[in-house]
Amino acid sequence: MPHSAPLRVPGTAPSPSPADAFYAQSLELIAAARDKNRATISAVAPVIGHSLATGGMLHVFGSGHSEVLAREIIGRAGGLACINGIPDPTAGFIENLVGYGTALVARYDRRHELRPAETLLVISNSGKNSAPIEVALYAKEKGLHVVGLCSQHMSRTTPTVHPSGKRLHEIADWTLDNLGVPGDTLVPLGNGEMSGPSSTLVGAMLLNLLMLETCAWMQAHGHPLPLLRSQNLPGAIEHNRRVAEPYKHRLSKQIA
């Protein structure tokens, strides 16, 4: 018997599949997040750009799955060579052990230096966990600018686990809002189950928009861009080594 389409009540549209629903909601969320964060990105880009133009670095920290977002702008084709990540060898396993974040960032500081007037990007979807909060507090004490990336809704409504009582948006000088919902999932699958996480794809877009605005500011003010190239292009490895040379003593991930 030939396969037939499922019966549908005349005049009704078929329900979108979970994948289609996620795709549509993600596009709307990215557009809304861009509009929501446009002014913040415009304010932060010159701060980062000026620091990089005067020999500084941009530092990035993300605990747990947020480390994926930190890696999005570190040592990649089309990215700036002067961006460095604060690695967490536990991959977020003990991010709520009070004191761990402070020890982690202090160790990074001894090895790679956190200098006043540089910028640190701290990524935490909930904005409540101890390690990201301690990294942000440490950087503030060192005189760095701190930019948080989180779900503002979650950060404002979820109690912090840190003894200071503070959440990331209360520490950061600027906060980028990924517009995420509690649970970080968009699509119901029935029986109370949800899937379709949004924080990574929206966060990656916001970070890349910020990097492009930073590059545009540097170009507009006559500063060269230490941009990395894909190693699959001819001469790229030599180029990457050259642009990374001024930063190699501070990079935790060596270029080529």
Image (cartoon, grey):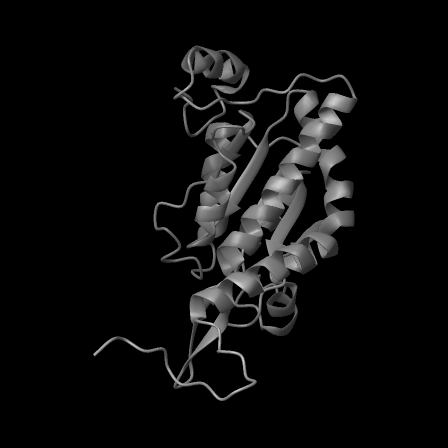
The residue positioned 58% from the left and 73% from the top of the image is 159
Q: Position of residue 120 (x, y in %)?
A: 61, 40
Q: Position of residue 80 (x, y in %)?
A: 56, 27
In the image shown, does 221 or 118 lie closer to the viewer? 221
Q: How many numbered marks appear?
A: 0
> Can residue 117 be seen from the camera position used here?
no
In the image shown, does 143 or 246 lie closer to the viewer? 246
In the depicted structure, whether residue 140 falls above or below residue 163: above
The N terminus - image quarter:
bottom left
Q: Position of residue 61 (x, y in %)?
A: 51, 45
In the depicted structure, whether residue 51 falls above or below residue 224: below
In the depicted structure, whether residue 152 falls above or below residue 49: below
The residue positioned 79% from the left and 21% from the top of the image is 221
In the image shown, does 205 or 41 lie closer to the viewer? 205
Q: Position of residue 163 (x, y in %)?
A: 56, 65
In the drawing, does residue 42 fall left or right of residue 77?
right
The C terminus - image quarter:
top left
> Can residue 83 be seen from the camera position used here?
yes
The residue positioned 56% from the left and 85% from the top of the image is 11
The residue positioned 49% from the left and 29% from the top of the image is 112
- Quadrant of residue 30 within the rendered picture: bottom right
In the drawing, does residue 245 fall left or right of residue 173?
left
Which residue sits furthest front? 1
Which residue sits furthest bottom? 9
